[in-house]
Image (cartoon, rainbow, N blue to C red):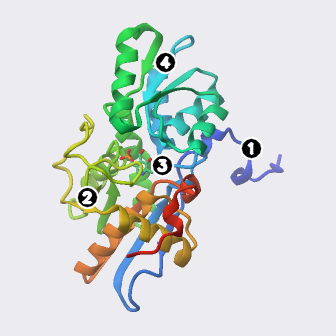
């Protein structure tokens, strides 16, 4: 029998929509006739709105496969937002309980989104940032290990493997293997490590560039200043060919420009990644640079930087 609905638009579960994100070509930031091409994975197109859907889906699948996440056990983790939203979306769809340690100063929209999905929040000191949330999650787990599946995205190999198994292969397919440079910000480092390892195996000539905020006190949500933060166990500083520091001001400026000049409303860590791509583009005559835009600007609309001007 001929199917009435084509497979491409057949009904699916929300969790089936994770991954297979478009690759955007950025046109406006390079001079005419440049031999450099810049592309960005539109990770804000994931159903939970960020790149972290991939890691959360893989961590949860691994927890279920190994029996650590089972009926009656609560998933516990520390997250400043996007991973939490990803866990919360999947937990709601799959019907298990979720407890998240979140710094109190994350935006109201974030907290409301998490609660809308039914997550329980443990608010931690804003002064201690994401490290304070990590310490609280560890404390809760040690207090009652039998009650929780402590997902620990910073130490969980399923995090970087999600990108090794999906994001990297998508990038290779979408560029026909032509990419010469991969640029990505470091949070848990799952994206950079997973994609980087796979690309390196595929073609050792591909250059891997990691991006960090250039100071400990920064406003690039999602990224870590590795020298001063609790280092994620999955992070391997030796993988990168280069590691670059980007200021919050430049990240803001390029986030604004992405919206105004490319029509891409992305989050601040996308501006940081773009800054690193543009610095790189100035140093090479030709190349195909691929980066990742982790989330959408809609997550930061209450932030004042949208109205500020570049100095
Ligand atoms: C907005 C944003 N950008 C970048 C990242 C970094 O991704 P990863 O944790 O894979 O290093 C995150 C991670 O939470 C994020 O939320």
Name the one closer to the observer, 126 or 236.
126
Q: Alpha carbon of mark 3 to alpha carbon of mark 2: how far? A: 22 Å
The residue at the point 58 percent across, 57 percent down is 301
| Contact? badges 1 and 3 (CB < 8 Å) | no
Q: Count residues near mark 1 (Cα–Cα under 10 Å), then give few for <14, some for 14-19, many for 20+.
A: few
Could you tell me residue 288's position as x and y percent? 34, 73
**Which of pointers 1 and 2 lies earlier in the amino acid sequence?**
1
**Which of pointers 3 and 4 lies earlier in the amino acid sequence?**
3
The disc at residue 214 is 2
**Which of pointers 4 and 2 lies earlier in the amino acid sequence?**
4
**In-image side of 37 versus 90 (left or right):** left
Helix, strand or loop status at disc 4? loop
Q: Alpha carbon of mark 1 to alpha carbon of mark 4: how far? A: 27 Å
Helix, strand or loop status at disc 3? loop
| Contact? badges 1 and 2 (CB < 8 Å) | no
Q: Name the residue under label 3.
A: 51
**Which of pointers 1 and 3 lies earlier in the amino acid sequence?**
1
Q: Name the residue under label 1.
A: 11
Could you tell me residue 311's position as x and y percent? 37, 76
The disc at residue 287 is none
Kindly report which numbered mark, 1 or 3, lies closer to the viewer in this rendering. Answer: 3
């Amino acid at each position: 029998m001929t199917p009435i609905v084509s497979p491409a638009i057949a009904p699916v579960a929300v969790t089936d929509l994770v991954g297979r994100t478009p690759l955007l070509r950025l046109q406006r930031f390079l001079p005419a006739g440049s031999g450099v091409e810049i592309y960005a994975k539109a990770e804000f197109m994931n159903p939970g709105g960020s790149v972290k859907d991939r890691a959360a889906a893989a961590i949860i699948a691994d927890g279920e496969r190994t029996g650590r996440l089972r009926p009656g056990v609560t998933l516990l983790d520390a997250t400043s937002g996007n991973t939490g939203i990803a866990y919360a979306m999947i937990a709601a769809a799959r019907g298990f309980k979720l407890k998240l340690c979140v710094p109190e100063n994350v935006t109201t929209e974030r907290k409301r989104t998490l609660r809308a999905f039914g997550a329980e929040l443990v608010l931690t000191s804003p002064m201690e940032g994401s490290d304070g949330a990590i310490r609280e999650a560890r404390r809760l787990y040690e207090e009652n290990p039998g009650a929780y599946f402590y997902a620990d995205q910073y130490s969980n190999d399923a995090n970087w493997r999600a990108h090794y198994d999906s994001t990297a292969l998508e990038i290779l397919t979408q560029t026909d293997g032509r990419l010469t440079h991969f640029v990505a910000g470091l949070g848990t480092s799952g994206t950079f490590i997973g994609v980087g390892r796979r690309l390196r195996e595929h073609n050792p000539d591909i250059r891997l560039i990691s991006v960090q905020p250039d100071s400990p006190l920064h406003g690039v949500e999602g990224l870590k200043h590795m020298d001063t933060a609790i280092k994620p166990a999955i992070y391997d500083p030796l993988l990168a060919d280069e590691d670059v520091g980007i200021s919050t001001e430049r990240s803001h400026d390029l986030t604004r420009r992405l919206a105004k000049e490319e029509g891409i409303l992305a989050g601040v860590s996308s501006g940081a990644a773009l800054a690193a791509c543009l610095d790189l583009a100035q140093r090479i005559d030709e190349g195909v640079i691929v980066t990742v835009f982790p989330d959408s600007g809609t997550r930061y609309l209450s932030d004042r930087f949208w109205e500020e001007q570049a100095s």
